[in-house]
Image: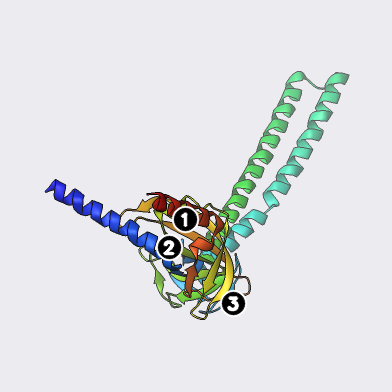
Amino acid sequence: MNDLARSSASLILLFAAFAGTGALNGAELESFTEPYRRVAVPATEIGVLAEILVAEGDHVSQKQLLAKLDDTVLVASLEVARAAKNALGSRNGAEVELAIRAKQLASFRELRDRGNATEREVERAEGEHLQAQARLQSIHEDLEVRRLEYERVKAQIKIRQLESPIDGLVVQIDKEVGEFVAPTDPVVMHVVQLSTLKSVFSVPMQMVSGLEAGASVNLLIGYEPIRCQGVIEFISPIAEAQSATVSVKIRIPNPDGSIPSGAFCRWDLKATPAARRVSRASDDQSQSR
């Protein structure tokens, strides 16, 4: 049974390799264009969706505000935190008290030097001065905590606002205003990047060694083909055993949006110089045999 399985696998691989060679010798590789990036934009907090600020088909820029969750309670908390942060009466009073204690200490030291005050009176004045310093420091620390609390509430409001992670196009909105966004289904909309496209081709293994990331390739886009240039971005280190092919991702610049996503895409692999050299070497080896 094992011998039969191994024989079947060998025949499949042999057929796949033969089919791949035939495809190369006959025509181009075929694929489709895709958005370079497709991002599902989630809400990072749970809550009711209060506003959607874009529509499907809108072009958006990175960091642009897309939607908001309800933040009524947090906005009220922010006002409380702002009032607490800006309440400076206790600090001003502590500063005045410290100034008075400093003057009293200086007076007692001067009187002591003249013999009109005892050492105990000076020590008492020094202690009161240190206490006034400690009270002012405590108030400063309390104000810093209030400031941090204010910043924390601001951050909580910020994360309830959905921003676009890329420059792109809104292609799908999954939620409606007033709908509850739950942790199990946080995605609110999808944004795609179309200023750059990609196309993934399955390249026969014997031709991959002639390719390298960063190399330019010529492509034909559409059924009424438009010629354009792409760049090999990634060559998978893992081959697909059943088809004896390797995935190669090609980046296609599309700054004016003239190339549609989902268009038929062809790549004449033998027109790529490095791959052509490998193909010629393979043909020479076949003829020598």
First in sequence: mark 1 vs mark 2: 2
Residue drawn 70% across the image and 47% down it: 91
- The answer to whether 212 appears left or right of 115 in the picture is left
Task: Say if residue 65 shows up in the picture.
Answer: no
Q: Which residue is mark 1?
A: 279
On the image, the x and y values in percent for residue 189 come to 46, 71
Q: Residues within 10 Å of mark 2 (few under 14, many from 20)?
A: some
Q: Quick check: marks 2 and 3 in contact, CB under 8 Å?
A: no
Indicate the secondary structure of the residue bearing disc 1. helix
Q: Which residue is mark 3?
A: 258
On the image, the x and y values in percent for residue 43 come to 46, 64
Q: Amino acid at mark 2?
A: Leu
In the depicted structure, whether residue 166 falls above or below residue 257: above
- The answer to whether 189 appears left or right of 101 in the picture is left
Q: Amino acid at mark 3?
A: Ser
On the image, the x and y values in percent for residue 84 come to 62, 55
Disc 3 from disc 1: Cα separation? 33 Å
Q: Which residue is mark 2?
A: 24
Q: Amino acid at mark 1?
A: Ser
Q: Which mark is residue 73?
A: none
Q: Residues within 10 Å of mark 1 (few under 14, many from 20)?
A: many
Residue drawn 49% across the image and 66% down it: 267
